[in-house]
Structures are given as structure tokens and as C-alpha cells.
Image: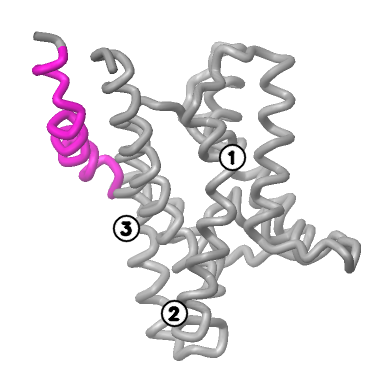
Amino acid sequence: MNNIMRLWLRRVILLLAGLTIAHLGVTLFLQSDLGSDPFNVLIQGMHRSIPWPEAIPMTHGWVHVGVSFLIILVLLVVDRSYIRIGTLLCMILGGPIIDVFTLVLGSMIHAQSPFVWRLASLVLGCVILAFGMTIVIKSQAGTGPNDLVAVVISDKARWKFGIVRIAVDVCFALAGFLLGGTLGLGTIVCACLVGPTAQVFLPVSEKICDRFLNIKADRE
């Protein structure tokens, strides 16, 4: 196995680790039922409101996969250069990881749990999500489909990414709320906490990823 293949294998391993950590965080604030991140408000609303056939046992995770797949189909038409192996892995594995963690954590944290416990789960989930997200970013193996929506619009329209990201998140959250998703304290906490926390984790995650990727050794 040459150096390039070894490097990409390491990047994929890092991405999978980050993806698992991030979706543990997503599951924690979904189970708190205080509102989730804007994209999962949309998924939650679609899961609750669309009359899925009884023969198809749709879960939150599988709706997540389906919507991510639709985003990738659009990107194939708009500009396929944005799609990397990590994008496909995020599409395929993100939803099922949420389903697995939901099965594990469902009896421990849920809508009937004490409010303080739910609030703690929400905050912890945001912090865990931020850390996992920075591992995914620093793996440089690709970005999740939902995150690419703002990236592509910003690049193509030449608008500032921050403004586009806010607009996209508002659209996700509003559409999800109208479909029956939980838009609440969790959505606000997520919007205010995840970004700054990720900023703190970025240098830490960069060191972790660089050490695991052994970039210096590979370059030499």
C-alpha cells in the first residue's frame, strides 16, 4: 500500500470516528426533546408528518439517509466536485448511527425525563457534536451533505458563508417546524453553543488528526 492510499485510509478512519462522536451528540439532544439542530428539526418533522407506508418501518435515521441522498443527487447536477468519499459515508452512516444510539440511550433520556436531566443531555450533546464535527472537518475526507448546502450556495452565489449558513439553517428549522419537528430551546442552544465550542476544539482536533495521519512522516 503506497503512502497516498495509507493517508486516505487514515482520513476515512478519522472521519468515521468523528461521525460516530458527532451523531452521539445529535442523539443526546434529540432524546432531550427540547429541540435539535436545524437540519434534524427538518428530519424530525418529515419523520413525524409524512404518511410512510406501514410496510416501510421508517426511523429518524432512515429519513436522514433519504434526505441526504436527495441533496447528493442535486449536487451531482449542480457540481459533483463537492462530493468526496466522506460525503457518501456521512450520507449512508449518519442516520443508522443515530438509530443505534437511540436504541441504547432511549430508556435513559427521553421526553418524560426530569427537565434538568434533559437540559444537561442537550448541552452535553452540543459539546460532543462540536468535537465530533471538528474531527470530521480535520480528517479532510469530505463534508456531510447537509453542510454542503450552504457551502455550495455560498460558492456559486459568491455570498458570505456565514450569512448563507444562517439562512439555510433558518429554512431547515422553519420547514421542519411546519412539518411537526421540535423547534425550541435546544435549537437556540445548539445555534449558540456548537459554533463557539467547535472553534475551541478545532486546534485540539487538528493536533489529534495530524498525529494520527502522521502527515510529516508521509511527506518525508
Check if residue 134 falls in the magenta segment: no
Q: Amino acid at mark 3?
A: Val
Residue bounds of the magenta highlight: 197-218
Residue 185 location, x and y as percent? 51, 68
Give the labeled residue for mark 1. Answer: 91
| Cα distance between the residues tagged 1 and 3 | 22 Å
Give the labeled residue for mark 3. Answer: 127
From the viewer's perspective, is 104 left or right of 10? right
Give the labeled residue for mark 2. Answer: 118
Quarter occupied by the C terminus? top left
Q: Amino acid at mark 2?
A: Arg
Q: Which type of secondary structure does the marked residue at label 3 adopt?
A: helix
Q: Amino acid at mark 1?
A: Met
| Cα distance between the residues tagged 2 and 1 | 28 Å
Residue 112 location, x and y as percent? 55, 89
Mark sitting on residue 11? none
Residue at left 64%, top 51%?
173
